[in-house]
């Protein structure tokens, strides 16, 4: 419990200490994003399509080495007024037991309502496949702001890196304040593999 509380505080500090990154010159890559929402009247749920735009930015953390990069994914599900940003970076804070952090920021106006928690991340081969969970700890920093620390235990880190670099889709499970659930599935195929290979090659 103490370790989890310490990690939560350290993760919150990481968000506060990380300023916005200026975009590096280069082309952004747009791929598919699909939101699956639980529907009590339909066991199959509700499926809504959108997109995610991936790009690489220079890391602005003061402790990061020169030339380090951050992956940013911008999600849009227009019919649900969902805008979400994923910021994936290596962790250089020795007090934080995580190899990488994944920052999730949700924009205002999401028609499904307030998100209570983002329990973790899963990787899968395609949109319909069952996801394999990453070894990680997720904390809710504030309304619409979440941070996930990927485990620094060597065995976990190796497995996480392999899953992230080899799988073409990522699942983000969502728990709403109403206790309804959803999954946001986002594509990250070979077109953006070099981004992830760079950030997860260490």
Image: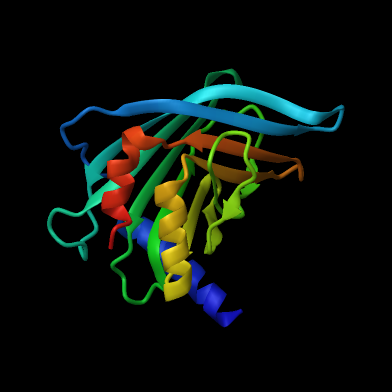
Q: Which of 165 and 40 is in front in this view?
A: 165
Q: Is residue 33 above or below residue 73?
A: above
Q: Residue at x 43, y 48 (%)?
A: 166
Is residue 19 something one can see in this rendering? no
Location of residue 5 in the rendering, given as x and y in whole percent from the top left corner: 55, 74
Outermost residue on the bottom side: it is 2
Q: Is residue 77 above or below residue 116?
A: above
Outermost residue on the right side: it is 41
Q: In the rendered view of the protein, which quadrant contains the C terminus?
A: bottom left
Is residue 106 something one can see in this rendering? yes
Location of residue 92 in the rendering, given as x and y in whole percent from the top left corner: 28, 67
Outermost residue on the top side: it is 79
Location of residue 88 in the rendering, given as x and y in whole percent from the top left corner: 37, 50
Q: How many labels does the image show?
A: 0
In the image, taking residue 144 as reference, residue 102 lies left or right, namely left
Q: Nearer the viewer, residue 108 or 47?
A: 47
Q: In the rendered view of the protein, which quadrant contains the N terminus?
A: bottom right
Residue 66 position by quadrant: bottom left
Q: What's the image's color scheme?
A: rainbow
Q: Nearer the viewer, residue 118 or 6?
A: 118
Q: In this view, does 50 lie above or below 58?
A: above
Q: Residue at x 59, y 53 (%)?
A: 132
Q: Nearer the viewer, residue 129 or 15?
A: 129
Location of residue 169 in the rendering, given as x and y in whole percent from the top left corner: 50, 39
Q: Residue at x 53, y 64 (%)?
A: 135
Outermost residue on the left side: it is 66
């Amino acid at each position: 419990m103490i370790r989890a509380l310490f990690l939560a505080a350290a993760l919150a500090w990481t968000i506060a200490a990380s300023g916005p990154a200026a975009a590096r010159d280069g082309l952004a890559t747009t791929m598919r994003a699909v939101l699956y929402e639980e529907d009590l009247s339909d066991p199959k749920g509700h499926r809504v399509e959108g997109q995610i735009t991936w790009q690489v930015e220079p890391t602005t953390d003061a402790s990061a080495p020169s030339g380090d990069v951050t992956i940013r994914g911008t999600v849009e599900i227009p019919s649900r007024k969902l805008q979400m940003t994923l910021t994936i970076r290596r962790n250089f804070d020795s007090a934080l037991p995580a190899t990488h952090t994944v920052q999730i920021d949700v924009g205002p106006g999401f028609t499904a309502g307030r998100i209570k928690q983002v329990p973790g991340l899963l990787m899968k081969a395609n949109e319909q496949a069952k996801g394999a969970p990453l070894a990680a700890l997720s904390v809710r920093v504030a309304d619409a702001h979440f941070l996930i620390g990927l485990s620094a235990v060597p065995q976990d880190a190796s497995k996480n890196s392999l899953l992230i670099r080899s799988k073409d889709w990522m699942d983000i499970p969502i728990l709403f304040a109403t206790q309804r659930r959803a999954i946001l599935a986002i594509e990250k195929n070979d077109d953006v593999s070099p981004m992830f290979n760079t950030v997860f090659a260490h």
